[in-house]
Image (spheres, helix red, strand yellow):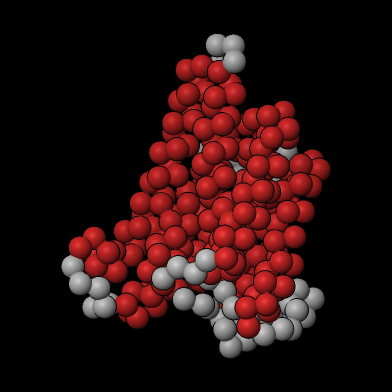
Amino acid sequence: MNGWTGQSGPALFIVETNGAMGLVWTTLIYIIGFVLIHLYSKKMKFLNGVPRSRFLSLAGGISVAYVFLYLLPELAHFQSELEGELNGGVWAFIESHIYVVAMLGLGLFYGLEVMVVKAKKRDEKKAGTEAGVFWIHIGSFILYNSLIGYLLVQEHSPGSWGTFFYFAAMGLHFIANDNALSNLHEKDYDRYGRWLLTAAVVIGWLVGIATELSDLIVSFLVALLAGGIILNVLKEELPEDRESSFSSFALGVLLYSVLILVI
């Protein structure tokens, strides 16, 4: 299920090689980019405070545009390609209702967030329980990052614009997620979290290189990711006390939409 395969990506980010090694070397560049983002996003002090940084709202708009203009059309293409190929059972249902998986992805990550918030409120006065909340939360994002690293390989082809768009959208999404986790967990995130999230995206990438799953499984993972991205963006943008910038969010949606549609 590879998108944008017929177009060359930007020369700055693409190593022009062919086949499996081309995919390794091309995506290695992007993985290094993801690693640098996780390790150094904490230095972006201008992102902190209220009202919410316009840059973070812009990044949220870009992530949402990527989901609706790239990931969801890919799921529609997958559904049309595999329709009727599976005989009965749960997989056949998913084959015809892949968007249900995206909805489940949103629900899954929402449930995890609610669990973390409730645990934090319940245990905030009990010594030592903050660590438990942190590990629950960071564990969900380890899975999330692993999925993003895995799909960098499984969802794209060497030299494609799709790889660049994926890196740009997910890189900005990582900055927003890192900022939220850092503000919530502070020293624990700085000491453990950013390193674990960095390792998770690299491990996901390595697994993607070493294994090749069916289009059905990859599309299932893409749908989960789409739901997760939407949830993570909205939970940061919507709370009234964040004083988020709708104009910046809308600008991110508009600019990224035009970029994808034009290229």
Extreme residue toward the left, this view: 88
Q: Residue at x 67, y 72 (%)?
A: 24
Q: Is residue 65 above or below residue 156?
A: above
Measured as percent of width and height from the top left, residue 125 is found at 56, 11
Extreme residue toward the front, this view: 210
Q: Residue at x 25, y 73 (%)?
A: 86
Extreme residue toward the bottom, this view: 6
Q: Is residue 61 visible?
A: no
Q: Nearer the viewer, residue 104 or 231?
A: 104
To which quarter of the image does residue 181 belong?
Answer: top right
Q: Is residue 122 above or below residue 260?
A: above
Location of the C terminus (image quadrant): bottom right
Please indicate whether residue 120 sits to the left or right of residue 83 in the image.
Answer: right
Q: Is residue 36 visible?
A: yes
Measured as percent of width and height from the top left, residue 136 is found at 52, 32
Please indicate whether residue 150 sits to the left or right of residue 183 in the image.
Answer: left
Please indicate whether residue 257 sits to the left or right of residue 13 in the image.
Answer: left
Measured as percent of width and height from the top left, residue 128 is found at 59, 15
Q: Nearer the viewer, residue 84 or 181?
A: 84
Q: Residue at x 74, y 77 (%)?
A: 14
Q: Is residue 237 above or below residue 260?
A: above
Q: Residue at x 23, y 78 (%)?
A: 84
Q: How many marks?
A: 0
To which quarter of the image does residue 223 belong?
Answer: bottom left
